[in-house]
Amino acid sequence: MSHSKANDQFEIWRYGLRGGFNFNRNLILSAEYFESRIEHKIRPRWNAVFYDPDDLTSYTFKALKREARGRLTYRTPGGMTISGSLGMAKLRLDYDEDDDIFYFLEDDVGGMEFSAGDEDTEIIGDLAASWAPRDNLSIYVYYARDLVMSAVKKLHSDSVGAVVRWKPSDSWHMTMRGQYWSYEDDNALFLLQGDSFWELMPDEGIWFGLDLSTVSTSDACDYYWSPYWDQRLMTVLRYRQIWHGYSFRLDLMGGLQREDARPLRRTDDADLSSAADWEMAWGVSSSYNKRVFKKVDLFVDANVMALREYIDHRFLIGFNLGF
């Protein structure tokens, strides 16, 4: 079960179950079911038929996303792990399209028409592979198809990504990741992120790291998160302990964040686009995993990030039960 709030727009409760069994040490079959209750607050700007900078009215939308999928995971004799899932997802929007707000929204600039999409079930799934060509290098690549997290409009997305982890030495770890999303409405989002950690005090488990990231969408949209060249430079002080049946990590983060001004939709949208210069950002992140009984593991994950005008957070708690 998890709770998250992001970008001062989204609040999401997500809960579900996942279970499976091993045919042998290399083949696992599993299934999962999750529900997400989405609360989405917007002040129409980019998708407003007419943008009035003096109108500060905001609207709250709610939706329920249900998803179920089966997954097959196989480990090859050479050590590569291949995982694939296939399932169904449905988004139920909790509003009436005859509400007055929809007369002021449009899908395309100048189109003056809005469609929330149907409530048909969508096919979702993913395909991933991970391998370690060397002892100090691991690679993970994946493709995923899913519904966009929105309570205003139903859209699907396709994404591809990769994560590369390299350990130049036992006391120096590096990670690079990238992901690209293609949305049903012809928009696109990409993320690039890299971090590097050095072990300062091995006996105490103290590490110091740098984390750099940038994320941007091609076009602005009120119906989902659409940043424009959001760039972050963070320093991280990490405490980490790993024992048999127990792991704990605590990150204290501080740094800078900025965002570019997005090009205007129309020449008369003079106050619509805005930029933010480098400003302070800070955060705390932690994870905890412990075997509380012989076959029961507890895992907890928390993340809080304070940016210019809002605070993002995500809390997750769950149990793993083995037989």
Image: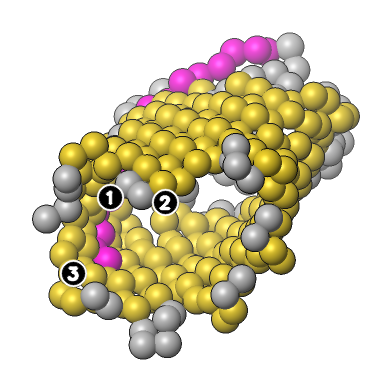
**Where 34 sits versus 120, above or below?**
above
Looking at marks 1 and 3 on the same chain, the residue that comes earlier in the sequence is marked by: 3
The amino acid sitting under disc 3 is Asn
Looking at marks 2 and 3 on the same chain, the residue that comes earlier in the sequence is marked by: 3
Circles 1 and 2 in contact, beta carbons < 8 Å: yes
Taking the spot 36% from the left edge, 64% from the top edge, the residue there is 125
Q: Which residue in the structure is indicated by mark 2? A: 147
Look at the image and tell me in which quarter the C terminus lies: bottom left
- In this image, 142 relative to 215: left or right? left
Instruction: Residue 201: say if magenta.
Output: no
Residues shaded magenta: 55-71
Looking at marks 1 and 2 on the same chain, the residue that comes earlier in the sequence is marked by: 1
The amino acid sitting under disc 1 is Glu
For discs 2 and 3, the disc positioned in front in the rendered view: 3
Q: Name the magenta segment's main secondary structure.
A: strand
Q: Quadrant of residue 297?
A: top left
Q: Which residue in the structure is indicated by mark 1? A: 67
For discs 1 and 3, the disc positioned in front in the rendered view: 3
Q: Tell me, yes or no, if residue 27 can be seen here.
A: yes
- In this image, 172 relative to 183: left or right? right
Foreground residue among 77 and 62: 77
The amino acid sitting under disc 2 is Leu
Foreground residue among 6 and 43: 6
Taking the spot 45% from the left edge, 55% from the top edge, the residue there is 156
Q: For mark 2, give the secondary structure.
A: strand
- In this image, 78 relative to 7: left or right? left
User: Which disc is residue 22 wearing?
Assistant: 3
Instruction: Residue 66: say if magenta.
Output: yes
How many marks are shown on the rendered structure? 3
